[in-house]
């Protein structure tokens, strides 16, 4: 069997078919819904593919029409879906939601994902070679909560070793998904084993009881080379350890004959990438002070998917070896695309648009306001257009 191609990012996790209401009201009163898709990891995969990266999504779906729709839709973004497996015994997960107050995320959600095909993912039935053939492997705490088999799979993928990619982990604490009170402890364990971690300030307090802001979260999570603390409408703060800095801006890896990624090669800074290394093999020095970038002023339509879009933007800039401040700005711009659309997935800004907006002066960044449709051609705000 031929070794799988090495891609920029592999995202592993469940995606579901989403039904969005055609009008406002209680779930009991909504007469019809529009179909879409949603899933933390596939959202990141689609965002990165749209930004021009080679991305693979790995999951399981049912042998049903909803599974067909998921695979076709994710694949339509340019994502490699060849490692998605079909399950003849378990269905594809679905969920319904109401419109509610989308700006404040006050709405009803009804999940039908118990016993889904994705919840049966395990070390035995997932193509591990395809998962590990990446410069970055992106996971989230949602997958860990789906089943014991899924948790065992994540732990196996995070085990240090020569074939381990750079590990990106979004905490994504969902209290309702966990079967017991062990969820917060498990999420902390997984976060400590990752190289890049995304966590919301609010979820860190909810899951771990950590208050005191980003610095307090970093004190509890000193292990990751990069820790990104999302602070909602305020902004985001990133911490990079001295060990993590060289690890994330090393030359592009080369592919060996066996398909494994190895450090080496050279090229311009625009093509530089994370150095692929096993986490935990060396003690990490004390973290540097955090880098804060304020969020953009956004006319919010819905908050769903904004965190995933932020991760996609940040990882895209990381893969390109861009400065930390620029990575955070890319994250905010991608999040703004999700915040100004009603579904989980939004059309991200083009790379040219993202690069141009991320490069504006601080005062222009602070006055920039984005509304629905801003990612479409010709709709960039006047105050930041190139003269």
Image (tube, rainbow, N blue to C red):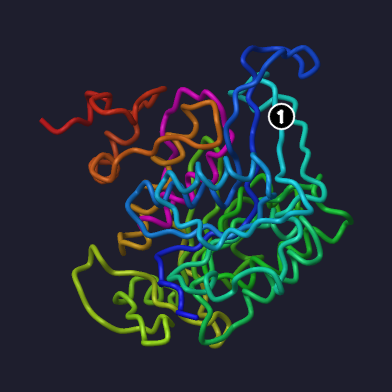
Q: Where is residue 243 in the image (x, y as percent from the top left)?
A: 45, 78
User: Would you say residue 216 is visible in this rendering?
Assistant: no
What residue lies at 44% left-to-right and 53% top-to-bottom? 79
Residue 299 falls within the magenta-colored stretch: yes
The local crowd at label 1, few if under 14, some if 14 to 19, many if 20 or more residues have their Cα within 10 Å, is some
Quadrant placement of the C terminus = top left
User: Would you say residue 304 is visible in this rendering?
Assistant: yes
What residue lies at 49% left-to-right and 31% top-to-bottom? 339
Q: Which of 233 and 121 is in front in this view?
A: 121
Q: In which quarter of the image is residue 219?
A: bottom right
Q: In this view, does 177 lie to the left or right of 248?
A: right
Q: Which of 319 and 50 is in front in this view?
A: 50
Magenta residues, start to end: 292-317
Q: In this view, does 8 lie above or below 68?
A: below
Q: Position of residue 196 (x, y in %)?
A: 52, 65
What residue lies at 31% left-to-right and 61% top-to-bottom? 320
Q: Nearer the viewer, residue 75 or 265?
A: 75
Q: Element type at marker 1?
A: strand
Q: Is residue 266 above or below residue 219?
A: below
Q: Name the residue under label 1.
A: 96
């Amino acid at each position: 069997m031929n070794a799988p191609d090495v891609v920029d990012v592999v995202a592993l996790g469940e995606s579901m078919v989403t039904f969005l209401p055609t009008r406002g009201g209680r779930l009991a009163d909504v007469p019809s819904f529009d179909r879409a898709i949603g899933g933390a990891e596939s959202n990141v995969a689609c965002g990165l593919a749209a930004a021009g990266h080679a991305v693979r999504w790995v999951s399981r779906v049912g042998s049903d029409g909803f599974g067909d729709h998921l695979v076709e839709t994710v694949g339509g973004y340019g994502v490699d879906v060849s490692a998605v497996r079909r399950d003849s015994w378990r269905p594809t997960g679905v969920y319904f939601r109401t419109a509610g107050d989308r700006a404040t995320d006050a709405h009803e959600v009804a999940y039908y994902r118990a016993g889904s095909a994705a919840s049966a993912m395990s070390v035995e039935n997932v193509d591990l070679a395809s998962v590990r053939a990446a410069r970055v492997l992106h996971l989230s705490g949602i997958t860990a909560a789906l089943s014991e088999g899924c948790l065992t799979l994540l732990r196996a993928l995070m085990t240090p070793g020569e074939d381990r990619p750079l590990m990106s982990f979004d905490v994504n604490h969902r209290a309702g998904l966990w079967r017991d009170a062990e969820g917060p402890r498990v999420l902390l364990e997984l976060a400590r084993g990752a190289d890049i971690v995304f966590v919301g300030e609010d979820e860190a307090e909810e899951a771990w009881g950590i208050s005191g802001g980003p610095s307090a979260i970093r004190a509890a999570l000193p292990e990751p080379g990069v820790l990104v603390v999302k602070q909602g409408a305020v902004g985001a703060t990133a911490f990079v350890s001295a060990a993590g800095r060289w690890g994330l801006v090393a030359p592009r890896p080369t592919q060996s004959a066996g398909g494994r990624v190895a450090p080496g090669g050279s090229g311009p800074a625009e093509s530089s990438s994370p150095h692929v290394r096993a986490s935990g093999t060396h003690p990490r020095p004390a973290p540097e002070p955090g880098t804060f970038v304020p969020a953009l002023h956004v006319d919010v339509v819905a908050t769903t998917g904004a965190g995933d879009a932020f991760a996609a933007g940040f990882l895209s800039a990381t893969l390109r070896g861009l400065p930390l401040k620029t990575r955070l700005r890319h994250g905010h711009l991608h999040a703004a695309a999700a915040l100004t659309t009603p579904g989980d997935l939004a059309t991200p800004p083009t790379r040219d648009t993202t690069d141009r907006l991320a490069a504006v002066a601080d005062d222009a960044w602070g006055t920039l306001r984005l509304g629905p449709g801003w990612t479409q051609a010709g709709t960039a705000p006047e105050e930041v257009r190139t003269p």
